[in-house]
């Protein structure tokens, strides 16, 4: 069989009308770059929060049409809130001295952004790493601090081993480790992997303060902080004592996780840290055998909940074996498979996070592009 090409997919998509009734989904600019891997076709359709319902119906129709192309075994079409990125167009780099809603208080670092979750296992660390790499791919300087002292997984996710070196300039500081162009620091570099650590609240705070302040960070536009899971006292103290510009909350669509996510929102509200938005992880699963989309944990819960409580919804990341395999082998998908749908979805989240940080619009959703004539 002839190899499947982007043109095969585009020619089918060009036969599908855009919601405005003028032109097709391709000419209307609603289709992102198309990724093809074997018989799997992946891309995103642009929508706005107001048009999600219409676009969800269109998404189904588009997926079906793509599945009808000979050679296509699996079609993954996601809705995304922003226009596809224009090649090579990075957001303007942060200007030194430019007013920020909240400074990081750490020399050279403009914004600290916490990635938090109401409970463990929802993909918080995976999201933190891929968000950091996605921010970097937008042309920003990025650092990652692993604050999950109970189960530091950032070294593994970045494929980093060894110990940080002492800084040559200032004896008592450490140099961060660097991978994929991102500076990384974790307690995991400093203690053996199999050491059981019992942390009392004050110890966590002092360990983290040390990691944050005693590391010789290079200049960064954003430092992503992977928070410990949950919303207990330790997390609250951390949110309060770290000069955060904002927080991203990761949730699965499960009800229980959503209840926990709400706790997360309340925690940040309590300490006046703006919630940048919610990311729904493991949103749905596309079966490799039957090509069908399975909404294992239910679907859309986080989006509805976000709307209800007035927190921006930053996007949904499907459950995907490739994400897990690459995370577990220290080759995060955004860095190692930048043309994948997942990488595009993480970049979409990253753009919204950056717009939120720099637009000074933390209390409001990130600006969205409106389809004019729907
Ligand atoms: P947390 O930090 O919330 O405990 P992790 O980021 O460590 O969660 O993720 C838990 C497990 O789920 C890991 O094995 C990770 O590879 C996997 N995982 C996370 N997100 C996804 C996803 N979207 N698709 C598939 N596996 C995922």
Image (tube, grey):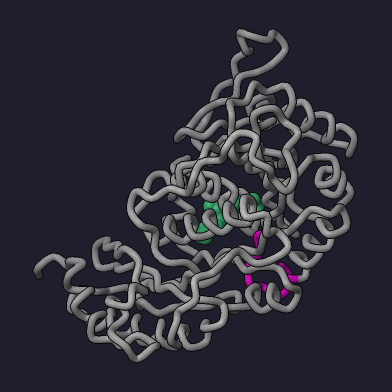
Q: Which residue is nearer to you in this view: 367 or 82?
A: 367
Q: Quadrant of residue 173?
A: top right
For the question of whether residue 116 can be seen, the reply is: yes
On screen, residue 5 above or below 131: below
> For this view, does 147 lie left or right of residue 323?
right
- Please tell me in which quadrant of the rendered image residue 153 appears: top right
Magenta span of residues: 249-258
Task: Name the image quarter holding residue 36.
Answer: bottom left
Report the front residue among 330 and 244. 244
Q: Measuring 47% from the left and 55% from the top, which residue is drawn there?
A: 347
Along the line of sight, which residue is nearer the eye, 101 or 264?
Answer: 101
Q: Quadrant of the N terminus?
A: bottom left
Residue drawn at point x = 34 percent, y = 82 percent: 62
In the picture shown, does residue 299 fall above or below 280? below
Q: Quadrant of ligand 1?
A: bottom right
Residue 255 lies in the magenta stretch:
yes
- Is 58 on the left-hand or right-hand side of 307? left
Q: Is residue 159 left or right of residue 353?
A: left
x and y percentages locating residue 38 in the rendered image = 24, 63
x and y percent of residue 174 in the render? 65, 18
**Number of marks in the rendered image:** 0
Residue situated in front as seen by the camera: 94 or 351: 94
Task: Please give the name of the residue rendered at 28% of the width and 76% of the height, measured from the top-left corner.
Answer: 26
Q: Locate the C terminus and report the quarter of the image it occupies.
A: bottom left
List x then y, in percent, for residue 257: 71, 67
**Residue furthest out toward the left:** 2
Q: Can see residue 329? A: no
Residue 122: image location, x then y, percent: 64, 59
From the viewer's perspective, tell me whether residue 206 is left or right of residue 245. Answer: right
User: Is 55 part of what is drawn in magenta?
Assistant: no
């Amino acid at each position: 069989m002839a190899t499947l090409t982007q043109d095969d997919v585009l020619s089918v998509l060009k036969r599908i009308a855009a919601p405005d009734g003028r032109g097709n989904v391709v000419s209307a600019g609603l289709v992102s770059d198309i990724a093809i891997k074997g018989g799997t076709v992946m891309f995103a359709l642009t929508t706005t929060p107001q048009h999600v319902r219409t676009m969800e119906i269109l998404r189904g129709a588009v997926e079906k049409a793509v599945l009808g192309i000979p050679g296509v075994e699996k079609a993954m079409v996601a809705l995304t809130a922003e226009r596809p990125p224009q090649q090579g167009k990075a957001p303007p780099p942060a200007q030194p001295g430019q007013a920020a809603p909240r400074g990081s208080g750490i020399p050279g670092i403009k914004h600290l952004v916490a990635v938090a979750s109401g409970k463990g296992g929802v993909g918080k660390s995976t999201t933190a790493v891929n968000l950091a790499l996605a921010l970097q791919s937008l042309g920003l300087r990025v650092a990652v601090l692993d604050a999950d002292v109970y189960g530091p997984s950032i070294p593994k996710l970045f494929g980093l081993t060894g110990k940080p070196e002492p800084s040559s300039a200032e004896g008592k500081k450490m140099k961060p480790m660097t991978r994929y162009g991102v500076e990384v620091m974790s307690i995991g570099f400093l203690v053996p992997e199999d050491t059981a650590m019992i942390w009392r609240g004050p110890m966590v705070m002092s360990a983290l303060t040390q990691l944050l302040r005693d590391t010789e960070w290079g200049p960064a536009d954003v430092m992503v902080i992977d928070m410990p899971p949950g919303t207990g006292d330790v997390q609250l103290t951390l949110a309060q004592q770290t000069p955060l510009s904002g927080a991203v909350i990761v949730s699965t669509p499960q009800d229980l996780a959503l209840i926990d996510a709400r706790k997360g929102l309340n925690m940040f509200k309590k300490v006046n840290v703006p919630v940048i938005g919610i990311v729904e992880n493991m949103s749905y699963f596309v079966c490799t055998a039957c090509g069908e989309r399975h909404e294992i944990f239910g679907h859309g819960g986080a989006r509805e909940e976000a709307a209800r409580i007035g927190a921006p919804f930053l996007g949904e990341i499907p459950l995907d074996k490739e994400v897990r395999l690459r995370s577990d082998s220290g080759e995060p998908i955004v860095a190692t498979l930048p043309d994948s749908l997942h990488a595009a979805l993480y970049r979409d989240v990253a753009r919204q996070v950056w717009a939120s940080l720099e637009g000074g619009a933390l209390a409001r959703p990130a600006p969205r592009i409106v389809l004019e004539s729907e």
